[in-house]
Image (cartoon, rainbow, N blue to C red):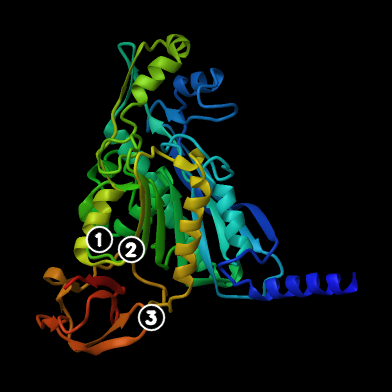
Amino acid sequence: MKKLMLALLLIFVANAFCAERYKDRMFDVSVEKDVVYSSDVSHLKALSPISTALLAYSILGDGMSVYLYDNETELTKVNLRMDIYSPKKDDEKKRPAVLVMHGGAFAAGGKNDYDQQTVTYCDSLAARGFVAAAVEYRLGITATIVNKTFSIDSLNFSRTVYRGIQDVRAAVRYVRANADKLGVDPDRIYLVGNSAGGILSLENIYMDQDSEIPPVAKTAPDLGGLDAYGVQGVSAEANAVVALWGAVHDINVIGDDATPVLLVHGKADSTVLFKTGRPLGNIAVVLENLMPSAAAAIGAYAFDVNTPTLYGSFVIDSLLTEKGVEHETYFVDGMPHEFYNYDDFDVKVQKKVFDFLYAQTQKSATTTVRAVALSKASRVRMGAGNMNFTLSSGNAAPYAVMDLRGRKVMQGSVSAGEVVDLSSLGKGVYVLNVRGERPVRFGLSK
């Protein structure tokens, strides 16, 4: 018996020592609820009768609210919150952080979600040594009832998405600005987004210039700039993204961005299309079939739901591949939206996510995020195929090109009008640092 007990003890100790930070569960987890990451943020106030009807008739499940609003002129101030999950009794001070955004068509869902794995991801990541945060963002789409038709306009839908983009940027800035307090490495902040959250995560890294803001966001009432509120003075862009059945509103915003990305998507997704199309295309029929009594109660007998065209994972993957940008994909034939509940895909998807994030932790940091003037336009201009770059102004500005291991592969100085040839670099992903400018990630596909 003593020999058996000793053998079991040795196995336990061996397993304990084999556990690897960021890869295996090692810690118990503590949760700090409702941490305010931005206060006094303007939001819609006048709820539409359809929200009350949906809840009353339990269309989307017990206790699930759907936020639809009558107009955008009646506003209120709200605080935006996150739940922060941390590994207990962990002395590490420079841990990667992962912000997790739920789905819900921008009108439903919450940071305490289980169905879309939000809580599962946060708890599992914190147990592996990450600091994780479940992020709430403003929900709600303006809807109208005209001539007994319930209508959502694609422009109003776009404004809702933009508000979410602002919120996620504010959340990233909060974590980065409070990195020391949270025990976080400000150069290793990652995003995991589900559906609507996946869209917001991709937009975080790709829509990073005020010139890329959709014009509809500037119509009255003006929603403001990308960083209109919250902590200022630090970068709002994540260092890597996991997009679960996500998309972008404009493929051109990707530009030369080379932020590491994992794209997960079912090829038969009819909610956020795998290729290109309008999301939620079948929602009007679903509403008509599910809630005739509720519709009658609010005086609406038809539904007209319009959403903007989005470009799904297939298109994003194709463009990143063409540009030679390092990224990963997990595309599954025949699977619909959020296919967690099919076979054992919940485990398979989680493994893909955990493996991708673990791989990010093994890379050397390629940039150091410090206070930046976010309104200042970059002077760096990348040439065709990223084979060269120029500077629009300035003289003898020092520059360095780093690979993804943090090794310096090229350096020098550049003045306005001078073309710096990058064609001697091999195929891969690099980071260009020019003094006084934001780092530029770029890929070479030659």
Image side of residue 229 versus residue 154, left or right: right
Q: Which disc, if any, is residue 327?
A: 2
10 Å crowding of disc 1: few (<14), some (14-19), many (20+) = many
In this rendering, the count of numbered labels is: 3
Of residues 186 and 431, the one nearer the viewer is 431
Please determine whether, in this image, residue 310 is positioned above or below residue 317. Answer: above
Question: Percent from the top left, x then y, of residue 313?
Answer: 30, 49
- The amino acid on which the numbered mark 3 sits, given as a three-letter code, is Arg
Of residues 363 and 369, the one nearer the viewer is 363
- The amino acid on which the numbered mark 1 sits, given as a three-letter code, is Leu
Q: Residue drawn at (30%, 58%), measured in percent from left and top? A: 206
Per the image, the residue denoted by label 1 is: 320
Q: Quadrant of residue 58?
A: top right
Image side of residue 87 versus residue 433, left or right: right
Question: Percent from the top left, x then y, of residue 422?
Answer: 17, 81
10 Å crowding of disc 2: few (<14), some (14-19), many (20+) = some
Please determine whether, in this image, residue 25 is positioned above or below residue 297. Answer: below
Please determine whether, in this image, residue 14 is positioned above or below residue 125. Answer: below
Question: Disc 2 on helix, strand or loop?
Answer: loop
Please determine whether, in this image, residue 408 is positioned above or below residue 349. Answer: below
Image side of residue 321 versus residue 3, left or right: left
Q: CA distance from mark 1 to mark 2?
A: 7 Å
Q: Earlier in the sequence, mark 1 or mark 3?
A: 1
Quarter of the figure with the N terminus: bottom right
Q: Which disc, if any, is residue 29?
A: none
Q: CA distance from mark 2 to mark 3?
A: 16 Å
Q: Residue drawn at (68%, 59%), measured in percent from left and top? A: 29
Residues tagged 1 and 2 counted as in contact (Cβ below 8 A): yes
- The amino acid on which the numbered mark 2 sits, given as a three-letter code, is His
Per the image, the residue denoted by label 3 is: 405
Residues tagged 1 and 3 counted as in contact (Cβ below 8 A): no
Q: Tell me, yes or no, if residue 136 can be seen here.
A: no
